Amino acid sequence: MSGITKEQVEHVADLARLNLSDEEAEKYTIQLNDILTFFEKLKDVDTTNVEPTSHVMPIYNVMREDENRPSVKREEALKNAPDHDEGHFKVPAVMEE
């Protein structure tokens, strides 16, 4: 396995417009090489009878059913509004004409 060099870390940092000190570049080079070394260890894991998956737990649709339910009446919602007009909330303009 070829490792990541400090020059590669500095190149990627430059592309990302990050200013790394020499100590930071050296630190990240070591950390990235440690990560790659760990990935190499994963190749030794026997996955012969393991089904491919994208999640460790089964995930199903967590959305509730879309059903018509009673909600707050318009008058009740507007009674605490600082300002309203013809059944709508009035808010200060955020864009100039």
Image (cartoon, rainbow, N blue to C red):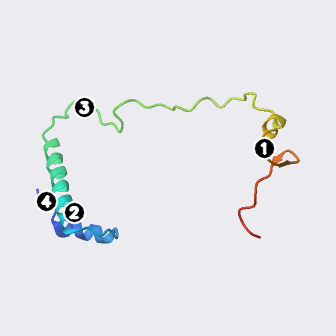
In the rendered structure, the answer to whether residue 40 lies left or right of residue 92 reads: left
Check disc 1 and report the residue beneath it.
81
N-term-proximal mark, 1 vs 2: 2
Name the residue type under label 2.
Glu
Identity, as a three-letter code, of the amino acid under mark 1: Ala
Tell whether 13 sits left or right of 30.
Answer: right
Sequence-earlier tag: 4 or 1: 4
Residue for point 35% across, 39% down = 54
Residue hosting label 3: 50
Q: Nearer the N terminus, badge 2 or badge 3?
A: 2
The label on residue 24 is 2
* Vertical side of 44 occupied by 6: above or below: below
Q: CA distance from mark 4 to mark 1?
A: 62 Å
Q: Amino acid at mark 4?
A: Gly
- In primary-sequence order, the first of circles 2 and 4 is 4
Q: Which residue is mark 4?
A: 3
